[in-house]
Image: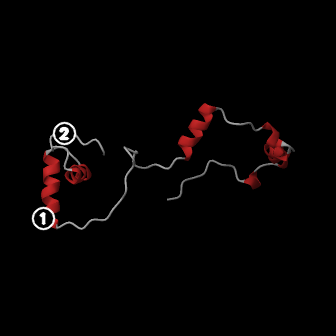
């Protein structure tokens, strides 16, 4: 069901009201009122424009496609779950072979 809009249609407004609402748009040299962003405003604007995504850790990540046997994947998922790790963390630890399963993953 379509929600009722609380906006006034343009045809329901008088000419005087429309003129009052659009008077600001009719001025010239509105560009002169703009100024450079302060450092705090620049950070806020950068945060607004940034796309959501995975937080960057270390030198970032590279997504790859790897074929793994189903049984092996199920076993590695179970081991990762028992160690309170994610599957990607378990894969990173297994690939590096320098960390033990008992330490928390530092990459993900």
Q: Nearer the viewer, residue 72 or 32?
A: 72
1 vs 2, front mark? 2
The secondary structure type at the circle numbered 1 is: helix
**Residue sitting at x 33%, y 62%:** 64
| Mark 2 crowd level (few <14, some 14–19, many ≥20, 10 Å Cα) | few
Q: From where the camera sits, is residue 40 visible?
A: yes
Spatial separation of the CA atoms under disc 1 and disc 2: 25 Å
Q: Is residue 90 left or right of residue 18?
A: left
Position of residue 45 relative to residue 63, above or below, is above
Left or right placement of residue 91 versus residue 33 in this view: left
Dot 1, how many residues are within 10 Å of its Cα: few (below 14), some (14-19), or many (20+)? few
Can you name the residue that lies furthest to the right here?
28
Residue drawn at 78 percent across, 44 percent down: 21
Residue 103's label in the rendered image is: 2
Q: Which residue is mark 1?
A: 71
Residue 106, picture quadrant: top left
Image quadrant in which you'd find residue 41:
top right
Instruction: Name the mark on residue 81.
Output: none
Pick the front one: 18 or 51:
51
The residue closer to the viewer here, 9 or 30, is: 30
Q: Which residue is depicted at the point 67% across and 36% down?
A: 37
On screen, 97 above or below 37? below
Looking at the image, is mark 1 or mark 2 earlier in the sequence? Answer: 1
Q: Is residue 20 visible?
A: no
Tag 1–tag 2 contact (CB < 8 Å): no
């Amino acid at each position: 069901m379509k929600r009722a809009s609380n906006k006034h249609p343009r045809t329901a407004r008088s000419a005087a009201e429309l003129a009052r609402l659009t008077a600001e748009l009719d001025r010239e040299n509105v560009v002169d009122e703009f100024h450079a962003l302060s450092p705090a405003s620049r950070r806020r604007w950068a945060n607004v424009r940034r796309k959501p995504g995975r937080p960057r850790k270390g030198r970032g990540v590279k997504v790859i496609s790897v074929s793994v046997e189903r049984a092996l994947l199920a076993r590695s998922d179970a081991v990762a779950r028992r160690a309170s790790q994610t599957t990607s963390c378990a894969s990173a630890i297994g690939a590096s072979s320098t960390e033990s399963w008992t330490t928390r993953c530092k990459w993900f």
